């Protein structure tokens, strides 16, 4: 493997949910490493602003609830750039109102559950399905953003975490069925990440609870997750497929109640 395997020279990446947060950070990083990006987002105005700041970038309006819109995203990218090397499915149904309504199953609204799966799982599947013929041609790959909540039980976000767990299995299925054709597929599981949307959706007291359980001295930033996404999408990860890379500052790696134990023993000594 000649040259710098983390570079994207000559390659094209689609980033859904690319207008802000983790998606925008990933778009900037891949562009900085020589790639060209299609920034797909339901917030088309914001996607256009970011695309205007990145050399060679393309903004695409995307509604993941629409099969037509999702398939058009792939077609427009290939028509514009002539190829596709990376599909980074990063978009999800998020926002303060959604997060507040997404609680435990006993009080779950069926419409919210259905919409969460329509956007997160069905939308991701359709994007992958439409992209696979082009990714086979370039021996490209897919990176699906999930969440460490897909690997753990919680008292909140039952629909969101369940949908992300489904995407993990989708990622494994694609890796297994298309690996011999040269297509890799991995899932990236961030923890709580300090995006503008998160700052709006979660009160500081709740963020502090998560930060206390993080093994780092702070929560991750979008740039931290972008580095992991770019690694999985690059040739540096050519031998990694069908995997879940947890990028949560160690929050999912330890015994329950670690912060309490830490406090107990620090006081004792």
Image (spheres, helix red, strand yellow):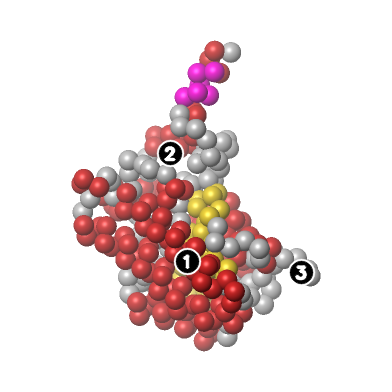
Name the residue carrying label 1: 173
- Residue 242 lies, in percent from the top left, at 54, 61
Which of labels 2 and 3 is toward the front? 3
Describe residue 81's horizontal placement relative to residue 68 as left or right: right
**Which residues are the magenta region?**
260-265
Real-space Cα distance between discs 2 and 1?
34 Å
Q: Residues within 10 Å of mark 1 (few under 14, many from 20)?
A: some
Asked whether 162 or 247 is in front, the reply is 162
Q: Is residue 20 visible?
A: no
Q: Residues within 10 Å of mark 2 (few under 14, many from 20)?
A: some
- The residue shown at (63%, 72%) is 35
- The residue shown at (37%, 51%) is 161
What element does badge 3 sit on? loop
> What is the magenta segment's predominant secondary structure?
helix
If you read the primary sequence from the N terminus, does the residue marked by circle 2 or circle 3 appear first?
3
What element does badge 2 sit on? helix
Name the residue carrying label 2: 207
If you read the primary sequence from the N terminus, does the residue marked by circle 2 or circle 1 appear first?
1
Name the residue carrying label 3: 1
- The residue shown at (59%, 82%) is 137
- Residue 211 lies, in percent from the top left, at 49, 36
Real-space Cα distance between discs 1 and 3?
27 Å
User: Quarter holding the N terminus?
Assistant: bottom right
Which of labels 1 and 3 is toward the front? 1
Marks 2 & 1, CB-CB < 8 Å contact:
no
Q: On screen, 63 above or below 222?
A: below
Marks 2 & 3, CB-CB < 8 Å contact:
no
If you read the primary sequence from the N terminus, does the residue marked by circle 1 or circle 3 appear first?
3
Q: On screen, 196 above or below 234?
A: above
């Amino acid at each position: 493997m000649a040259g710098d395997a983390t570079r994207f020279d000559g390659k094209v990446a689609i980033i859904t949910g690319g207008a802000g947060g983790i998606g925008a950070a990933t778009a900037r990083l891949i562009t900085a490493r020589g790639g060209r990006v299609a920034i797909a987002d339901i917030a088309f105005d914001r996607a256009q602003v970011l695309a205007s700041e990145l050399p060679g970038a393309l903004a695409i309006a995307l509604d993941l609830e629409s099969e037509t819109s999702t398939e058009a995203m792939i077609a427009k990218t290939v028509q514009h750039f002539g190829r596709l090397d990376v599909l980074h499915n990063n978009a999800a149904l998020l926002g303060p109102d959604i997060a507040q309504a997404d609680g435990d199953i006993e009080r779950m609204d069926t419409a919210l559950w259905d919409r969460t799966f329509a956007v997160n799982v069905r939308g991701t599947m359709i994007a992958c399905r439409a992209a696979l013929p082009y990714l086979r041609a370039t021996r490209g790959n897919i990176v699906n953003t999930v969440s460490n909540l897909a690997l753990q039980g919680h008292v909140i976000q039952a629909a969101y975490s369940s949908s992300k767990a489904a995407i993990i299995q989708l990622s494994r299925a694609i890796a297994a069925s298309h690996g011999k054709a040269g297509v890799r597929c991995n899932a990236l599981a961030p923890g709580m990440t300090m995006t503008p949307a998160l700052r709006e959706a979660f009160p500081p007291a709740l963020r502090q609870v998560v930060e206390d359980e993080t093994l780092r001295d702070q929560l991750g930033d979008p740039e931290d997750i972008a580095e992991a996404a770019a690694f999985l999408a690059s040739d540096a990860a050519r031998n990694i497929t069908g995997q879940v890379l947890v990028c949560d500052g160690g929050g999912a790696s330890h015994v329950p109640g670690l912060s309490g134990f830490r406090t107990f023993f620090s006081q004792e000594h």
